[in-house]
Image (spheres, rainbow, N blue to C red):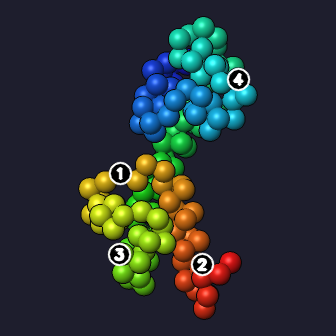
Amino acid sequence: MSPDCPEDLLPQVRAELALSQAALAALLGVHQVTTVGRWERGEIAVRQPRVLCLALERLRRERRMEPPDTLTQLRALEARLDIPALAFVLETSPLTLRRWLSGGLRIWHPRIVALALEEVAHRLGRESWAA
C-alpha cells in the first residue's frame, strides 16, 4: 500500500467497525472474500490504494455519524411513544432502549436500527399500524 494508506489501516478499520475480513469485503464490494486477508498479509497488492483508503475513510465516517443520527431518531420517537411501547414495536427490551438513549450501550447495527426507526416514524404518521 502507499505511504498515504499504511498496511495496518485495513485491520484497524475492521476492528473499529467490528467486521470480519469477509464482511469488509462485502461492504467494499470485493468479490473474493479472501482478498481483504491477502491485502492485509501483503500477499497481493492493492491496485488502487488511494481509492481503497478513501473507501475505508468513508466507512469510518459513516459509522461515526450514524449513531448520533440513530440516537436523535430514538429520542424523537421516545417523545411520541413511551419506552415500553417503543420497545414492543422494536421487539427489544425497555432496558436496552434506555441504555441506547443514555449512551451506555453501543448500537451494534446502527444502519439497521436507523432503518427500523424510520419505518416506525413513518407508521406513526399513519392512523393505522397496518402496512
Lower position in the chain sequence, tag 1 or tag 3? 3
Q: Find out whether the residues at labels 2 and 4 contact each other: C-beta distance under 8 Å.
A: no
Q: Is residue 31 above or below residue 42?
A: below
- For disc 4, the neighbor class at 10 Å (few under 14, some 14 to 19, many from 20) is few
- The reply to whether residue 50 is visible in this rendering is no
Lower position in the chain sequence, tag 4 or tag 1? 4
Task: Please give the residue where the numbered disc 1 appears in the rendered image.
Answer: 106
Q: Quadrant of the C terminus?
A: bottom right
Q: Amino acid at mark 3?
A: Ile
The foreground one among 79 and 93 is 93
- For disc 1, the neighbor class at 10 Å (few under 14, some 14 to 19, many from 20) is few
Lower position in the chain sequence, tag 3 or tag 2? 3
- For disc 2, the neighbor class at 10 Å (few under 14, some 14 to 19, many from 20) is few
* Nearest to viewer (mark 4 / mark 3): 3
Q: Is residue 46 above or below residue 77?
A: above
Residue name at image x 33 percent, y 61 percent: 96
- Label for residue 32? 4
Lower position in the chain sequence, tag 2 or tag 4? 4
- Label for residue 83? 3
Task: Please give the residue where the numbered disc 2 appears in the rendered image.
Answer: 122
Residue name at image x 73 percent, y 28 percent: 31
Q: Amino acid at mark 4?
A: Gln
